[in-house]
Image: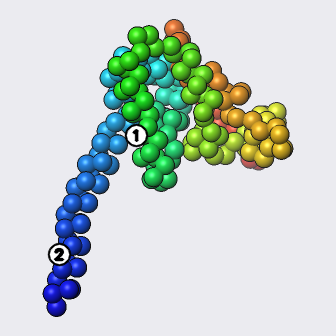
């Protein structure tokens, strides 16, 4: 009987310690993954401002892709998400306190070099169906199904969509495909 009691006490102690620890960690990850939080560092304010003027915020669908959507793995990949989020956070804090000048273009190029197509495809899933755009469909097919030695990244063609200084907001108008008269 003593052995069972000891096991139950250990399990309950584990739950009492693990649940608050997990909750605090999760809460911190969610709170620190917003554009508002990212903009608290003056180095990142430029990126947030240029993100606000892009179609990743201003589009007819009303969808907004936040920092986390592009710069981190999908949250369902829990371990990789937490590891990458923590790594980026430590790297950004280190840069904040040690760099005298923050080179936006250099850091933008480093980020694009590290991007994987799956980061874009979290939101852009149906890229093979683009009405009246055969060239785009073929280009996307070569990204989704690359021939050996000819791998392409989404950012090879779409590098200038986000984080560019603009005088006006970039707005992409959604057009409903023509369905005909139906008669």
Alpha-carbon span between mark 1 and mark 2:
32 Å
Q: Residues within 10 Å of mark 1 (few under 14, many from 20)?
A: few
Between residues 111 and 94, which one lies in front from this camera angle? 94
Between residues 50 and 59, which one lies in front from this camera angle? 50
Q: Which residue is mark 1?
A: 86
Q: Quadrant of the N terminus?
A: bottom left
Residue at x 65% of width, y 36% of height = 176
Q: Position of residue 45 (x, y in %)?
A: 40, 18
Q: Residues within 10 Å of mark 2 (few under 14, many from 20)?
A: few
Residue 34 visible in the picture: yes
Q: Position of residue 31 (x, y in %)?
A: 31, 39
Q: Position of residue 65 (x, y in %)?
A: 49, 35
Query: 111 left or right of 33?
Result: right
Residue at x 42% of width, y 30% of height = 91
Residue at x 15% of width, y 87% of height = 2
Q: Which residue is mark 2?
A: 9
Residue at x 56% of width, y 21% of height = 108
Look at the picture and state if 23 lies above or below 105.
Answer: below
């Amino acid at each position: 009987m003593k052995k069972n009691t000891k096991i139950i006490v250990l399990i309950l102690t584990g739950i009492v310690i693990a649940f608050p620890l997990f909750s605090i960690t999760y809460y911190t990850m969610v709170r620190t993954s917003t554009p508002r939080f990212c903009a608290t560092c003056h180095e990142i304010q430029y990126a947030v401002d240029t993100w606000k003027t892009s179609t990743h915020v201003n589009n007819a669908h009303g969808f907004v892709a936040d920092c986390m959507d592009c710069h981190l793995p999908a949250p369902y990949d829990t371990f990789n998400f937490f590891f990458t989020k923590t790594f980026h956070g430590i790297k950004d804090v280190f840069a904040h306190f040690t760099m005298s000048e923050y080179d936006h273009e250099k850091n933008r190029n480093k980020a694009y070099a590290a991007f994987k197509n799956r980061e874009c495809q979290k939101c852009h899933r149906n890229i093979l169906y683009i009405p009246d755009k055969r060239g785009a469909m073929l280009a996307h097919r070569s990204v989704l199904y690359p021939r050996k030695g000819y791998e392409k990244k989404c950012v090879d063609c779409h590098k200038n969509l986000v984080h560019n200084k603009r005088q006006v907001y970039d707005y992409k108008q959604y057009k409903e495909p023509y369905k005909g008269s139906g008669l």
